Amino acid sequence: MTAPAVTATAASDRIAALLAEHDTWLRVERGLAANTVAAYRRDLARYASFLRARGLTDPGAVPESVVAEYVAALTGARDDDGRPRYAPASVARGVAAVRSFHRFCVDEGLSVRDPAGDVGAPRVPSGIPKALSEADVEALLGAVTGDGPRARRDRALLETLYAGGLRISELVGLDVADVDLDERLVRVFGKGSKERIVPIGRRAHDALADYLAHGRPLLDRPGRPGGAALFLNARGGRLTRQGAWLVVRAAGARAGLDGRLFPHVLRHSCATHLLDHGADIRVVQELLGHASLSTTQVYTKVSPDRLRAVYEAAHPRAGRAR
């Protein structure tokens, strides 16, 4: 009776070993961002548990029907209130993780067939980012008052997010050395540790200069782990993503924008406003660090008023008197 238990354990460990190898492959070969790798790791841990519950411990022995069953289980999962447990985007990411794992196994010669290649994922509704109006952004950026070190930090944080269209994770990853106040430039490390140089405007420059001169020195604590971090928390450590998001939400509450904020609100607003004022879409792509132009193109759908105005001004039969 002992041998089968040992064999099952060894097989289980094989799945764990392959998942660890896949994790390394995502980071080293594909260069995915740490947050994306962590999300895939969580998704695949759930998938591995699903397989083990069905006695499947060899990726090469997984039939397509089981992968389809897994997708159906994710889609049909409900919480205690009967609502879907996973959003369509979360299910789609879970399917992408499973496909990536099985493709990795085939490419590495660990499996002879890919059972996930033809399994479809649920369609994710095309969510168009809801940017704030320019007036709303002004209200948000003007919501921080006071001259204390945290107020100076929060003003610099909000101005920099909007000026450079940064992701919150990119913002909190900035070091003091990444800011060039003389040239009004910020060095940003985006997804996959890809570096880009982002310009900032006068207001962001002034807010950063004020924070560096009169805010950060008062937050800095000798010997604290903040080190070279640009944005520090009240204890002198590097501000976290959650901490930065709380700053945005607090400012939004003061500006009356409670129900209209989401983590990338200032990034989306930056892109939309640039395009509304005539910026070239490829310049916006470079600014935001999008690998594909199609990712940036979603912002061209945000402003139907601008689309109509351009159409009526340019089309010879738009109906407007000339």
Image (cartoon, helix red, strand yellow):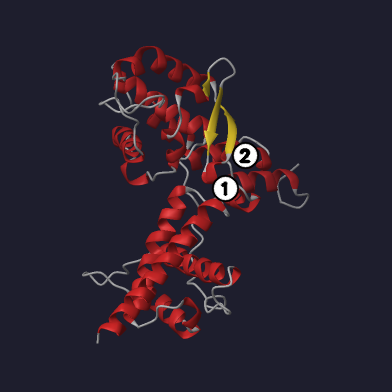
Q: Is residue 13 above or below residue 184?
A: below
Q: Give the side of residue 92 with respect to residue 111, left or right.
A: left
In this rendering, which labeled residue sits more in front, label 1 or label 2? 2
Q: Is residue 146 visible?
A: no
Where residue 282 appears, as percent x and y from the top left, is 68, 42
Quadrant in which the C terminus is drawn: top right
The single residue placed furthest to the left in the displayed view is 80
The single residue placed furthest to the bottom in the displayed view is 1
Where residue 46 appears, as percent x and y from the top left, is 35, 68
SS of the residue at dot 1? helix
Q: Residue at x 32, y 69 (%)?
A: 84
Viewer-proximal residue among 128 and 94: 94
Viewer-proximal residue among 10 and 277: 10
Badge 1 is on which residue?
299
Badge 2 is on which residue?
284
Q: Residues within 10 Å of mark 1 (few under 14, many from 20)?
A: many
The single residue placed furthest to the right in the displayed view is 316
Quadrant in which the N terminus is drawn: bottom left
